[in-house]
């Protein structure tokens, strides 16, 4: 494996960033013109500059239980391991900031009084897909899907996590665009998406514990307790601190000092969440929720951060996932497994989400809208795929299926939401406007 000097690594990083951003903008623009989410174009852009089109393989760093793997071909020449590692870390940091902005914009008043409805929906659309994960793991029981040495339970849990994921940021953006965040359906959906995200990472924690042959119940129990401890710390210590520090801010004042502190605290909370095992992006979101909703301040912070996060950091993260994806791994013989996975993705989220929505009192069209929204995977299933590869519990072919699932379910979301909303008028909210934080942008 070639080892480059620091100046050469820096040069590769600069060149790779230019390639990624150019590809993301160009393909994203094309998808916007086709009236599809830019995020899907940015995922596809990563695939186009990866091994699927360029050929070859990326190098892999050594792990405690796996040796280093040399890369090959043009993709390895353009994205050597040292530069790729830097890009991966930059993308992860951007994801933390992105989720911080999503949490910052969520009006917590919308969630009050709807706890039972939120938990009922979230529990249903997580438990059923996780159960489906065990079905998929039993059917896709071969070396093309599951690496040798990985037991059935571990593989089933990571498949269940992938099936249970909901694109929380995308749901937030759609509800904002439609002016429905303050409706009953919107509040239930956004609250459920937050809970789903935490539960999904707990499923990943269980898969990690199983992969490392440690006690699953013990590891999950510890992570749940630590998650509650983090929530308590944010509520008891961090939120009063933020209230104190922002008490004298007025519209028109600079947010520079406040924003600098928030960035530090969002990274610190992301670090805590990462160490707990529920992923740093959850920490970023939770910290965003703790910031007091001072009129004008949220908008000012978003204006300062939006372009950097959405135009720079998020395309890097999406490109990293695309670069790890080789659709050439999906031989025709794997098509039945792909179709099974996609079918259970949709049934476990849209179907179950619809049933849960009806159970908590939503009209049919709104329940369908809720089901479609929780079915959207966006970028979060890509996070599951990257974690699965890092744990060495899925194969590249399985990760490619995750990417296809992200594209298919995200493409479905916008047209279906428009269709079901048109069938039943829902009074929109009037007191908030969408700021454009989330990545489902059709500008």
Image (cartoon, rainbow, N blue to C red):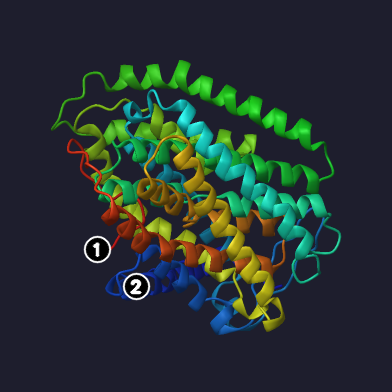
Using the image, determine if residue 140 lies above or below residue 425.
below
Specify the quadrant that holds the N terminus. Answer: bottom right
Describe residue 185's horizontal placement relative to residue 123 as left or right.
left
Q: Which one is nearer the viewer's eye here, 320 or 399?
A: 399
Q: Which residue is found at the position 75% from the left and 34% from the top?
A: 219
Other residues around mark 2 within 10 Å, as few (<14) / some (14–19) / many (≥20): some
Q: Which mark is residue 31?
A: 2
Local secondary structure at mark 2: helix
Q: Quadrant of residue 214?
A: top right
Using the image, determine if residue 82 lies above or below residue 333.
above
Q: Which one is nearer the viewer's eye here, 354 or 312?
A: 354
Place of residue 287 in the rendered image (x, y in percent of width and height, measured from the top left): 44, 32
Describe residue 276's horizontal placement relative to residue 87 as left or right.
right
Mark 2 and mark 1: Cα distance apart in space: 10 Å
Place of residue 159 in the rendered image (x, y in percent of width and height, measured from the top left): 68, 55
Q: Quadrant of residue 187?
A: top left
Describe residue 315's horizontal placement relative to residue 255 as left or right.
right
Q: Which mark is residue 443?
A: 1
């Amino acid at each position: 494996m070639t080892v480059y000097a620091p100046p050469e690594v820096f040069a590769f990083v600069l060149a790779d960033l230019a390639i990624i951003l150019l590809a993301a903008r160009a393909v994203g623009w094309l998808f916007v013109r086709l009236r599809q989410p830019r995020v899907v174009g940015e995922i596809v852009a990563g695939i186009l500059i990866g091994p699927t089109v360029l050929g070859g393989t990326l190098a892999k760093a050594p792990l405690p239980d796996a040796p280093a793997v040399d890369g090959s071909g043009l993709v390895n020449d353009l994205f050597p391991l040292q530069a790729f590692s830097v890009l991966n870390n930059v993308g992860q940091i951007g994801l933390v900031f992105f989720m911080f902005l999503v949490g910052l914009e969520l009006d917590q008043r919308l969630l009050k009084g709807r706890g039972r409805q939120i938990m009922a929906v979230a529990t249903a659309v997580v438990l059923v897909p996780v159960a489906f994960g065990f079905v998929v793991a039993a059917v896709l029981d071969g070396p093309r899907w599951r690496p040798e040495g990985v037991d059935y339970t571990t593989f089933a849990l990571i498949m269940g996590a992938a099936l249970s994921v909901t694109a929380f940021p995308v749901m937030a953006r759609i509800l904002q665009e439609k002016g429905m965040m303050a409706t009953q359906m919107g509040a239930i959906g956004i609250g459920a998406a937050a809970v789903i995200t935490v539960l999904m990472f707990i499923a990943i924690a269980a898969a990690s514990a199983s992969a490392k042959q440690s006690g699953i119940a013990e590891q999950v129990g510890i992570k749940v307790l630590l998650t509650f401890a983090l929530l308590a710390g944010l509520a008891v210590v961090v939120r009063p601190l933020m209230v104190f520090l922002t008490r004298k801010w007025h519209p028109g004042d600079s947010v520079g000092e406040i924003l600098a502190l928030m960035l530090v605290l969002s990274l610190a909370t992301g670090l805590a969440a990462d160490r707990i095992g529920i992923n740093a992006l959850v920490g970023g979101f939770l910290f965003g929720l703790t910031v007091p909703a001072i009129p004008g301040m949220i908008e000012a912070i978003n204006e300062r951060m939006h372009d950097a996060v959405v135009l720079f950091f998020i395309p890097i993260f999406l490109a990293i996932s695309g670069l790890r994806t080789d659709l050439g791994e999906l031989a025709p013989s794997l098509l039945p497994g792909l179709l099974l996975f996609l079918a259970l993705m949709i049934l476990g989220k849209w179907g179950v989400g619809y049933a849960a929505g009806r159970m908590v009192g939503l009209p049919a069209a709104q329940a369908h809208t809720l089901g479609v929204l929780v079915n959207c995977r966006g970028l979060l299933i890509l996070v599951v795929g990257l974690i699965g590869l890092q744990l060495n519990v899925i194969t590249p072919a399985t990760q490619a299926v995750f990417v296809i699932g992200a594209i298919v379910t995200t493409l479905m979301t916008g047209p279906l939401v428009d269709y079901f909303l048109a069938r039943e008028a829902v009074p929109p909210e009037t007191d908030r406007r969408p700021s454009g934080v989330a990545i489902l942008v059709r500008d």
